[in-house]
Structure formats: C-alpha cells, structure tokens
Amino acid sequence: MTQKFAFTTVFAANGEVLRDGDRIRRMLTEDEVAEAKKIAFSEGESSQVARAAQTEADAMRAIASQMQLILTRLHSESETLREDAAKLAIAAASRIAGAALDQFSVETVAALASDAMGELRGEPRLSVHCAPELEAPLSEKLSEVASRTGFEGAVVVRGEAGLTGADCRLEWRRGSISRSHEEIAERLDALVMKWLERGPEESTATDDSESAGGEADTHAA
C-alpha cells in the first residue's frame, strides 16, 4: 500500500531539519540569544547588588554596635574623670582652707563670737570653747570685741582638748552654735555629690545660667 507524503519534515534553506514529524528543533536567533544573555546578566547583576547591599547593611550594623560600645565607655570614663576632678578640687580646697584657718584661728573664732555678741546683747553669759592653745589670746581678743559690740554679759573662754585649729563652740543660755573643719568638709562633699548627680549637661547649663545672671546683675549695677 502506497503511503501518502505527509510533509511532516520541514527543512531550512541550508538543508537543516527544522521539524521532523512531531519533533521540533527549536532554533534561537541572534537577537533571542542576546536577549537571553541580557536577562541572565541582569539577574546575576541583581543578585550581586542584593548581596552587596546585604553586606553593606551588616557592616553598618557592626559599626553602629561598636560605636555604641565606644560611646558607653567614653561616658563611663567621662563620669569617672569628672568625679575624680571634683574630689581633687575639694581635697585641694580643704587643704588650703585648713592651712588658712590654722594661721588665722584666733581671728576666725573672734569673728564668729563677734556676730553672736551682736545678736545676744541681753544674754548674761557667753561661753566660748576653743582649742587649748587659743584660750589666752582669744580671751584678750574677745574682751575687746565685747566692748566694741556692746555685749554686757560675761564672756568665758575655755580651752577644750577635742578642738583644733579654728574649731569652736559658742554656748549661751538658750542655745549654741559650733563650727568645725569636719562639718565644713561634709557640707562641701554634699554639694559636690549633688553637683555630680545633675550630670555634665545639666551642670553646664546651670553654671551658664548662673554666669549669665551674674553678668546681668553686674550690668544692672
């Protein structure tokens, strides 16, 4: 039996078989090949860009983390240096003040007693407790002070072994006052601690406002 030619085989101009029955050989043109390469390159480039962006983001996070650690350490060191500087200043001031008070102990106690006499003119008696070595010179000094301030009561000066330098205690019928280097140091320490608790920025702002207020007062005067 003769089989009809089905024309299922398709040839190209150069004789290459393009189709053989149900089998099709797909041929790509140069433009199609170029387009395929372009797409593949674009996908590869996008992938590289994504990886580069991810690497950059990871690096930025690492830098930010390190910067935070550095800033925390600097803040801690700054607070330590600030506290050390304040303590050093207090120690130096206390030493200088202590030396000055020791040099002018009689005058310091006499000044305090003079202020008290001015407020206690009606008191019958004022007792002044001071360092033993100040008893004699202070007795003479306070006699002059009593006459000058108009204090009519008796002024009794007693040396006390527990007192040194310009430390003293004044007693009268209804009250007493005292001063000591230790009390002054404690007050200074309290002020320093309060200043340290405010923090650098707040302390600077407070100091600036106080300076501005002082300048305003000066100009106003």
Image (cartoon, helix red, strand yellow):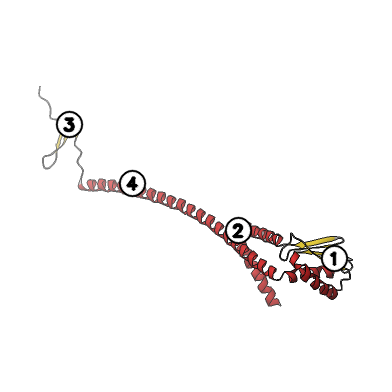
Question: Which residue, given by chain and number where applicable, does mark 1 sit on?
Answer: 126
Q: Compute the Cα span from label 4 to label 1.
A: 95 Å
Dot in front, 3 or 2: 2
Q: Nearer the viewer, residue 62 or 85?
A: 85
Seen in the image, is 205 located left or right of residue 28? right
Q: Nearer the viewer, residue 212 or 95?
A: 95
Labels 1 & 2 near each other (Cβ < 8 A): no
Question: Which residue, given by chain and number where applicable, does mark 2 sit on?
Answer: 199
Labels 3 & 1 near each other (Cβ < 8 A): no
Dot in front, 3 or 4: 4
Seen in the image, is 7 located left or right of residue 99? left
Mark 4 surroundings within 10 Å by alpha-carbon count, few (fewer than 14), some (14 through 19), many (20 or more): few
Question: Which residue, given by chain and number where applicable, does mark 3 sit on?
Answer: 21
Q: Secondary structure at mark 3?
A: loop
Q: Nearer the viewer, residue 188 or 5?
A: 188
Q: Amino acid at mark 2?
A: Gly
In terms of image quadrants, where is residue 3? top left
Q: Nearer the viewer, residue 18 or 4?
A: 18
Q: Residue furthest top?
A: 1
- At 74% from the left and 70% from the top, the residue drawn is 106
Locate residue 60, reporting x and y percent: 42, 52
In terms of image quadrants, where is residue 85? bottom right
Q: Compute the Cα span from label 3 to label 4.
A: 42 Å
